[in-house]
Image (cartoon, rainbow, N blue to C red):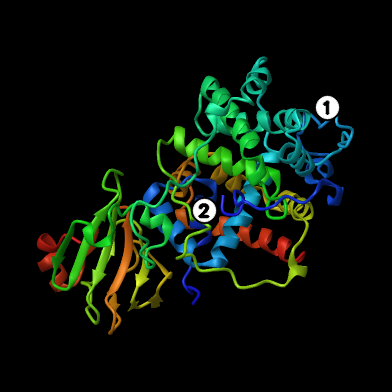
Amino acid sequence: MLNALAIAPQPPLASVVVGKTALVIGSALPLERRMRVGSTSGKLGTEASAEELMTAVAERRDRQAFVRLFETFGPRVKAYLIRQGADTASAEDLVQDVMLTVWRRAQQFDRSKAAVSTWVFTIARNRRIDTLRRARRPEIDPDDPALVPEPDEPADRVVETAQRRASLHAAVGELPEDQARLLRLAYFEDKSHSVIAEELALPLGTVKSRLRLAMGKLRAALETME
Amino acid sequence: MMPEHHPGDDLLIAYAAGSQDEPVALVVATHLALCPRCRKEVERLEELGGVLLEEHKTEALGEDSLARVLARLDDAALEAPDPQAPEPAPVDPRMPRPLRNYLGAGLERLDWTSYRGLDKAELLTEVPGFRTRLMRIKSGTAMPAHTHEGTELTLVLAGGFSDEHGHFLRGDVAEADAATDHRPVADPGEDCLCLAVTDAPLRLTGPFGRLLNPFLRI
């Protein structure tokens, strides 16, 4: 949740580039509920990206847009939480919390920095650590005077988040099965890498090197865009 | 100055996934405050988390789920508090924010114990299976050689130290596992201040180490 919650002015809706998003591009994705709920505002078509929906929520408190985000992300967040060890009832409650946080912090969402899915993922992750693990999550404070700032980057390296996400989807799809599986285990099960290694009957070093290999490929896929 | 020794990909992945225990996450987060490169890496890894979430299978929501959320949208009483509480103590510029949250009234108010040029203060004592410590090694002093049962992560906050694996300065993370037998020596000049997390007790190896072991209890 590094930049995801950074407060930044939102671009006006008129300037929004209507691009294909990973949620639309990825037609092979197990998206059971397409974004098909009509919008009363008339500004958002049925193919509106999650980022456009989020902007509508932030700027106009658009409930229809929120409903569509809820229908897209709610069932995924619930599956995520169950896989992380929540029972059905608490997963249901946590989904509500997560989606209410999305509504309340909508204005903190910065689409130039993160995709909605990234933002929702970080909110769900943090709620899970909070409630299921009952632990604190150490995080940086973007306003911390001790923070070592980023060196200035040339502006042309900023790639549309939808494009980045599409190439990440593609790169994940191209990973060898053992690496892809490990990556999902690492993200979706609240287990240390040593526990994962034990369960897969692999040396810890192998788990680490497979994760490193997977990361190398994903990094390369992103870097060709930058 | 940018750090040169970074946490491994596996540590950054576990941080982004939120599967780490708090002491390890504290080392990673404190490094992130000092390392723009790894901050960017974690942003990518969170992006990957979002992508995996998009691809994830779904679990049907309860029938009244949407109605319940919609009914609560206007409930101002549920307004989320700020993610970070206000600063409890004056800002110590050597201590980045994630770490400051664990220091109570400040570095010097911690419960330090001293032995032969090495000061230690325990943090996060409530987390089982880990020892989380701030260590201050007097400039030019060598720590006893030791190996580990598990993994030791050391983040330099001030000064620096050298061991067989290189030279470590502010923001650098040294990762040592059971195979590592090392003997860190603090740089001359400034005392070396580190945050160190071990997930099992250290084993002292040198002749003096063995001798000192029961007393020093590193």
Q: Nearer the viewer, residue A145 or A203?
A: A145
Seen in the image, is A34 located left or right of residue B15?
right
State the separation of the CA atoms marked 2 and 1.
42 Å
Tag 1 residue:
A37
Circle 2 — which element? helix
Q: Is residue A89 above or below residue A63?
A: above
Q: Nearer the viewer, residue B29 or A56?
A: A56
Seen in the image, is B94 located left or right of residue B72?
left
The 10 Å Cα crowd at callout 1, few under 14, some 14 to 19, many 20 or more, is: some
The amino acid at mark 2 is Val
Which of the two discs, 2 and 1, labels the residue nearer the N terminus?
1
Who's the residue at 79% across and 54% down the image?
Answer: A163
Mark number for residue A207?
A: 2
Who's the residue at 51% across and 28% down the image?
Answer: A86
Who's the residue at 77% across and 54% down the image?
Answer: A167
Q: Residue A117, image x and y in percent? A: 68, 43
Q: Is residue A180 above or below residue A147?
A: above
Would you say residue B201 is visible in this rendering? no
Q: Are marks 2 and 1 in contact (CB under 8 Å)?
A: no
Give the image quarter of residue B72: top right
Q: Nearer the viewer, mark 2 or mark 1?
A: 1
Q: Nearer the viewer, residue A59 or A39?
A: A59
Q: Nearer the viewer, residue B6 or A59?
A: A59
Residues at marks 2 and 1 on the same chain? yes
Q: Residue A43, image x and y in percent? A: 88, 37
Quadrant of the image for the C terminus of chain B?
bottom left
Q: Residue B90, image x and y in percent? A: 34, 59
The amino acid at mark 1 is Val
In the displayed orientation, state which residue is furthest to the bottom: B188
Who's the residue at 69% across and 46% down the image?
Answer: B51
Q: Is residue B59 above or below residue B84?
A: above
